[in-house]
Amino acid sequence: MCIRDRRSGEGSAWTLSPTTGPHTGGTSLTLTTTGLSSYFEESNWENFTIDSSADVGKFSSIVADSNGELHISYRDSTNGHLKYASNAGGTWTSYPIDNGGGYIGRYTSIDVDSNDKVHISYGNLNSWDLKYATNVAGSWSRSTIDDGGTGQSGMYSSLVIDSNDLIHVSYWARDMDLKYAAKSASGGTWSDEVVDWGTITGEWTSIALDSNQKPFIAFVDETYDRLEIAYKSGSSWTASTVDSGSSGAVSYTHLRAHETLRYLVCRLLVEKKKGGGGGGGGGGGGG
């Protein structure tokens, strides 16, 4: 689950259920939130259903645009669709963006650009591609970020757009490596590069930018069950261990970055598995 609010100075907290991941989820997509005064008449916590048309809501990601309107990407597990929901028209509407069926719409991540156009990364695990959908031209279009080459791609993507409308995406690909891709939100082609390799790594990625638009990527090294963070120094990437997993294996990272006058502060939310080692990263999970 990825949560973002584009409005400056707002402190709203948004929670989607079911949470991202193959091990949880029900049959509907539900939003729970506080700080509602600028969105709704009530300022208390509310819980309401957005879409109950099928077994929907897994791999959900949410963003609020500059007008405080919400945009959600998620998977329809019953029909194998990538779906999108928004209240931008005043009422909630939802519809499929990619209805290819099968294992489409997993590991979604959503953000909006400076024009409040929507950009979504997601997996097509039928062909092991990392896909991209946007409505920047008015109607929705889909393309491939990374087709996996001789390996695989499409899992654990995290997408963020900087103040110059450059899209940054972290994801798992190739021979179970961590990769990074970027392109302009207005068009152009994707450039991608390997960030970390050599082990089963690059799972559960989460990407954030500092005030200089520098990307930081939190991810899980499944081989050693440890949490790592990667950043670009010059033309190369550097990765270091944040949590060695000595008190339990780690998974499901969520990274945010902000800067004080003197220091860059990276905040990580980490789920620790109970018991021993990791469960391997090959499969796409249920749903």
Image (cartoon, rainbow, N blue to C red):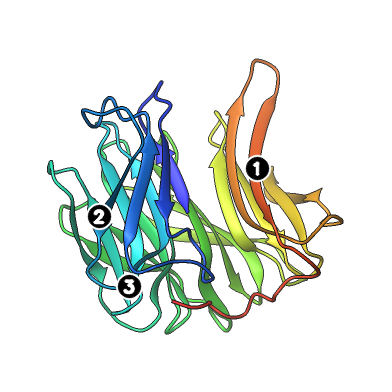
Mark 1 to mark 2 CA distance (whole Å): 29 Å
Mark 3 to mark 2 CA distance (whole Å): 12 Å
Type of residue at label 1? Leu
Q: Quadrant of residue 95?
A: bottom left
Type of residue at label 2? Ile
Residue contact between numbered discs 1 and 3, judged by CB atoms under 8 Å: no
Q: Mark 1 or 3, which is nearer the eye?
A: 3
Residue 187 seen anywhere in this rendered image of the structure: no
Farthest residue toward the top? 261
N-terminal-most mark, 1 or 2: 2
Which residue shows up at 27% across the image and 33% down it? 68
Residue contact between numbered discs 1 and 2, judged by CB atoms under 8 Å: no
In the drawing, does residue 279 fall left or right of residue 174?
A: right
Q: Position of residue 44 (x, y in %)?
A: 34, 30
Farthest residue toward the right? 246
Which residue shows up at 57% across the image and 51% down it? 206
N-terminal-most mark, 1 or 3: 3
Who is closer to the viewer here, 77 or 146?
77
Q: What element carries label 1?
A: strand
- The residue identified by callout 3 is 55
Q: Where is residue 2 in the image (x, y as percent from the top left)?
A: 46, 50
- The residue identified by callout 1 is 268
Q: Where is residue 48 in the image (x, y as percent from the top left)?
A: 28, 49
Q: What element carries label 3?
A: loop
- The residue identified by callout 2 is 50
Type of residue at label 3? Asp
Which residue shows up at 52% across the image and 69% down it? 155
